[in-house]
Amino acid sequence: MTGGATVHRVTTVAHGSTRLLHRLLEGRDSSCLTHLELLPPRPGVTVDWPAWTPPELRAAFAAQGIPAPWAHQAAAADHAHAGRHVVVATGTASGKSLAYQLPVLSALLADPRATALYLAPTKALAADQLRCLAELAPAGVRPSCYDGDTPREQRDWARQHSRFVLTNPDMIGRGILPRHESWSMFLRRLTYVVVDECHAYRGVFGSHVAHVLRRLRRLAARYGRDPVFVLASATAGQPGTTAARLIGADVHEVTEDASPRGGLAFALWEPPLLPPTDTPWHAVTDADADGPTDTGADGPAGYAPGAHPVRRSALREAADLLADAVAGGVRTLAFVRSRRGAEAVATLARDALAQTADGLEHRVAAYRSGYLPEERRELERGLLDGSLVGLATTTALELGIDLTGLDAVIMTGYPGRLASMWQQAGRAGRRGRDAVCVLVARDDPLDTYLVHHPDTLFGRPVEACVLDPANPHVLGPHLAAAAAELPLKPADLALFGGAPAEAALAELVAAGVVRRRPSGWYWTGDARPDVDLRGAGGAPVTVVETGTGRLLGTVDAGSSHFLVHPGAVYVHQGASYVVDDLDPTDAVALVHAEDPPWTTHPRDSSALSVGSVRSYVDAGPVGLFLGEVEVTARVTGYQRRKRPTGEVIDTRPLDLPTRRLNTVAVWWTVSAPGLDRAGVDPGDIPGALHAAEHAAIGLLPLVATCDRWDIGGISTAMHPDTGAATVFVYDGHPGGAGFAERAFHAAGDWLRATRDVIAACGCAAGCPSCVQSPKCGNGNAPLSKDGAVKVLDLVLDALEGN
Ligand SMILES: [Zn+2]
Ligand SMILES: [Zn+2]
């Protein structure tokens, strides 16, 4: 069903999920519904408990209301019991926990000395598992958490007495492996390692975790153990291959989900065009971004006022949908990309509900990663007990806590990857109930493309997680750490990747970090090497209210210059604060309560230098390159804009330090005669390149498993290192995460889609659906939409003729 489908027609389908959808969309402009995908309900398939299941475990599961396992749980448990590494990759709420609890607890019962480790990407998830195991685990297992929140005495107790230790990769790498002698009893009996939510280990973080697990396997082997790994993943492409890359050994995969599912009505929704008289720039735009890596020229800064916002903002649309859902008693989660966006959606929904009375405005709240654990738990409780009906959330919920009984999910924009989209959609309709999901398109090139090409969402397999353990920025530090734990032997190198490991060790030797002896590599330093797995550039910044000393929350280091610079308006649970001071050294931002009649929008400037070229294509007037670059970026100031018109009040300077990023970029150059022949006006060249860069960043997720927040870009009419007009697109992670490399190899498809999106856009001179970027640090100027099409035609002709 495409364009112009009426919401009324939907109701004629006898299907619980479409009835729910109708309740949500009733009275709205039906032309906004660009597609409706109906996913039929699926019955569950149970099987008998594996014959080896101990009777006391059967009884324990039965006491929890589980009379028999789903087929996928039993299949995964059988692999593990037989000593085969296994990953179970099935949908949200399909009972993946039982797939590892069954073999692990059976083994701990059978051998009263055996031990097991459980790794979660977050402390909250480990705590949640502990609650579960406390009810399930047989006496003598003594499950215990061991992480940064565990008090010292309890840590010692866990190390000495617990046979099932729940922790995270950071703690393994920093707390357990470097002190392996004191863990020797535990490691000598290590039977299983559970890696939960392993899809979280992707990109650079995933590459780090891959090496922590290799270090763990190496040390376990020295203590005579080869533990079986049981991994649990959300639905992902090629989970066995990814899991094998993660642990460094072959892994069997179980992907057939046998749990029951209700029907799902999945709507693609494009917000309506605003009437021309109604287009003064509104304060709430989709540009309220705080992506993980705001490194480059295109940091979150918002659109220039006066730009032509043709569509209603996705945030407003989502807020209205959320308010209607709450008014109709439909339990709903609205996923919003950014923290500020989540706050804005909750506030707008509350405002809308306050106007219709009934006190319903108190049943909507925001939930995001910067909140304190107590606050988050209270919100989770509220949603479970029904005192809250609607929650606007960042993707924090993707990891962890088991929320059940939700009727609807609203996505404010495509979450960047199909795997994330299905994870978010999976939050609705648990326990086999019918549910709805509405994807509200943001005003950007990718979302616009997707809601008009539903096959790219519903007809494609879910992406595989990308991780690259060979990244030298990751490999080197872990080899140093491994050598400090126990000298590395030549036979160890295969586990760490062979030749790249040897090269990285040679560098460590040259740097004097390790010494090569005939028997292996020895750590020579005094202090132990310390590897920050989340390496996004330091500790999160703590936000503190000056007068009261109250801790409001945290902001990750990479975003702090954009979100909590001095003068920034910072919103927390609907309350507005103004930042007095940001101390990057101590990672503290001081704020006071104030609700000024303006919003703040950071500006930044950045530069890029080419380190080396890895690969290139020489295509006459056009060159395509892949290589190492250094990006330096600084937030230079911020604009204050009046609410709600968006009129610029002034621009104020900031004195913040420069940040450096060594990474991998893809870039293309265009010669001056080429540009001339393509008919690009000399004065138009900067705008044409800038516009092409924005759209190319927006479309990169089509060919690489990243989203636009993982990457940055810089364009210039003359770059000193290339001697030509150049557009750079780079990975926002130190050492690169493989995105630029994918872009280089798929440049034809990538730039073709980019060119087509710009050319097909109905706007006059560029809009957020084509060439404007929500992250632009230059206020989206200059931009030349026509010039961008000419440049891309030239590049594509040259590359295709090559
Ligand atoms: Zn446009
Ligand atoms: Zn820009």
Image (cartoon, grey):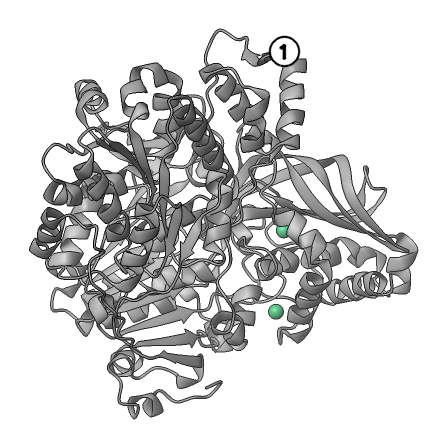
Give, as a three-letter code, the residue at label 1.
Answer: Pro
Compare residues 226 and 64 and report the one nearer the observer: 226
Does residue 649 sit above or below 755 in this rendering?
A: above
Residue at 42% in and 49% down: 199
Residue at 12% in and 53% down: 58
Compare residues 362 and 121 and report the one nearer the observer: 121
Does residue 124 sit above or below 745 in this rendering?
A: above
Does residue 289 sit above or below 34 in this rendering?
A: above
Residue 347 locus on image (x, y percent): 28, 57
Q: Which residue is mark 1?
A: 518
Circle 1 — which element? Answer: loop
Q: Residues within 10 Å of mark 1 (few under 14, many from 20)?
A: few
Compare residues 765 and 384 and report the one nearer the observer: 384
Q: Quadrant of residue 524?
A: top right
Answer whether residue 717 is visible to the viewer in this image. Answer: yes
Residue 65 locus on image (x, y percent): 10, 59
Residue 273 locus on image (x, y percent): 48, 76
Residue 30 locus on image (x, y percent): 40, 85
Compare residues 483 and 102 and report the one nearer the observer: 102
Residue at 20% in and 25% down: 158
Q: Residue furthest front?
A: 51
Answer whether residue 202 is visible to the viewer in this image. Answer: no
Figure quadrant of the C terminus: bottom right
Does residue 356 sit above or below 132 in this rendering?
A: below
